Image (cartoon, rainbow, N blue to C red):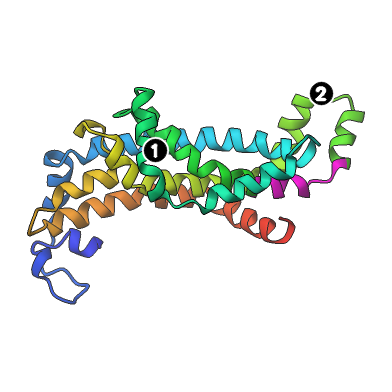
Amino acid sequence: MFSSAVDVDAAHRGATLIPTDLTLDHFVRVLDVGGFGQFMRNSAIVAVGTVLISAAVALLAAVAVARFAFTFRKAVLVLILIVQMVPLEALVIPLFLQAKNLQMLNSLLGLVIVYLAFSLPFAVWMLRGFVAAVPKEVEEAAYMDGASWGRMFWAVLLPLVAPGVVATSVFSFITAWNEFIFALTFLQDADKYTVAVGLQRFFGQNTADWGAVMAASSLITVPVVIFFVVVQRRLASGLTAGAVKG
């Protein structure tokens, strides 16, 4: 992909990984003419907003279903699994009509709310396992030392389940960053497009600007790679802990 992005003749380079001649014109055209910088900013807003809200809500919900006994608790967990089984394509029209009634079409906030609906069930279910794996004696010891519930949550519980929060955040980030169908359906103005929708600008009816497509695709992968580099240690421990203790 990157080799084609810096190749002068990306469309006719053949089956080789070595560019015939190097150029950065494809990146310049994507950023200046294609407006891909704005698309990346929009995607960053949507992805970061989805990750932050999803992590906060999912953690609180996971604590509720793992620590507190309430009516229909098992039913709530079953419903969370059922939501995961519904194909996204079946929800496009109902969510579009609902967003239209709420006047949230063509809005990045509306897109964030839609992505939250998809990322929260998985995040709640996964974090529930991490919270349940923390011994209650740890919390009781904090209470005995005079810690309030809020202090116990921030100083004791949150550090212990942080790997799980990171693991679920990766899922939420990738979902929001790469999603195409809902972004294409909900967003009408070009200046609000995300990277997945903006990428189709370089495809014509019978042809495609492959140099620009590969350059834009390379730019799309950069934030994901950076995100993984930042959280890789927490992610590895989180996936291992979830497999053993979940």
Residue 122 drawn at (x, y percent): 57, 48
Residue beneath the point at 36% across and 43% down: 92
**Left or right of 150 on screen, residue 218:** left
Q: Can residue 229 be seen in this view?
A: yes
Q: Which of the two marks, 1 or 2, is nearer to us in this view?
A: 1
Residue beneath the point at 36% across and 24% down: 101
Q: Earlier in the sequence, mark 1 or mark 2?
A: 1
Quadrant position of the N terminus in the picture: bottom left
Residue beneath the point at 50% across and 48% down: 170
Few, some or many residues within 10 Å of mark 1 (<14, 14–19, 20+): few
Q: Residue 148 carries which label?
A: 2
Could you tell me what secondary structure mostly forms the magenta stretch? helix
Quadrant position of the C terminus in the picture: bottom right
What are the residue bounds of the magenta stretch? 126-136
* Amino acid type, label 2: Ser
Q: Name the residue under label 1.
A: 94
> Which of the pair 53/68 is nearer the observer?
68
Residue 193 drawn at (x, y percent): 26, 37
**Residue 112 lies in what quarter of the image?**
top left
> Which of the pair 14/71 is nearer the observer?
71
